[in-house]
Image (tube, helix red, strand yellow):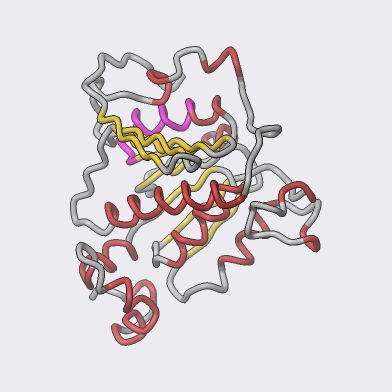
Amino acid sequence: MDLDQQELNENQVIEEFGRQLLVPGISEAGQNNLLKKNILLIGLGALGTIASQYLVRAGIGSITLLDFDRVSLSNLHRQINYNKNDIDQYKSEISKTILSNINSVTKIDQYPISFESFLEMNDFDNIDYIFDCSDNYVTKTNSSLFAKSKSIAYSSISINSSEGIFFSQSYLKENNSYCFKCLFPNIDETNHRCLNSAMIGPVAGFVASLACSKIILELAKTNPEMKNEILLIDLLTSDINKLQLNKSNCNHTDE
């Protein structure tokens, strides 16, 4: 395995990730692929905190955390990176501290700013995957359009009460695949946030875990092939419905 940049020998990687190496589709080659990947994670609320834990524990090489929000008491029943001592502190800063103690390989950067502000200060040349866990649908639209324009693999997740949505977008730069704005064309008028949505923590846990499983298994491949698809998840009925999206005449741009 090519582990020079992580400064770990093969025995150390096997010790940290040995159980994961046994999963079909990962093995040593797949783990090595994960060690080379750089993920941009947008939003560190209920979904983002759980996703950040699983992605770091999987041995992703680098993860950049974005969230301009601060921890509040109402967050604690579902946002697993925080406790009462963290109230009024930036979520991205606390999350980096928590995640930095998990393994010996993942490089973690954090910015207490919005995705839109982050765009103004970065070129994204080293980003392999954008994972939007934010609660802001305008941000999701912007991140989806940007990922498509730059041919970056992309997915987003959302929850409300007992329901969740996983959306995966083709990373190829072509106009015949759906973007987030294709699915929600009037999103700019709503600017909806999930601040007052009914929610229990396990719903966020299930949706984020499902998404991370798909992302980890895909990024472990030598040639990832993210597809345009939607998973509709209802935990009250235990139903997961998969919608494979047909080709679209998408003409949206990241303006």
User: What residue sits 37% from the left and 16% below the top?
Assistant: 252
Q: Which of 198 and 166 is in front in this view?
A: 198
User: What residue sits 76% from the left and 47% below the top?
Assistant: 74
Quarter assignment of residue 94: bottom right
Asked if residue 111 is among those painted magenta in the image, a careful observer would answer no
Residue 203 percent across, percent down from the top left: 54, 47
| Residue 29, above or below 74 | below
Asked if residue 148 is among those painted magenta in the image, a careful observer would answer yes
User: What residue sits 52% from the left and 42% below the top?
Assistant: 133
Instruction: Quarter of the image for the N terminus: give it.
Output: bottom left
User: What residue sits 36% from the left and 36% below the top?
Assistant: 231
| Residue 168, above or below 126 | above
Residue 150 percent across, percent down from the top left: 34, 33
Quarter assignment of residue 96: bottom right
Asked whether, in this view, residue 254 is left or right of residue 196, the answer is left
Residue 83 percent across, percent down from the top left: 74, 61
| Residue 133, above or below 186 | below
The span shown in magenta is 141-153
Quarter assignment of residue 124: top left
What's the magenta bit mostly, secondary-structure-wise? helix
- The number of numbered badges drawn on the structure is 0
| Residue 151, above or below 54 | above
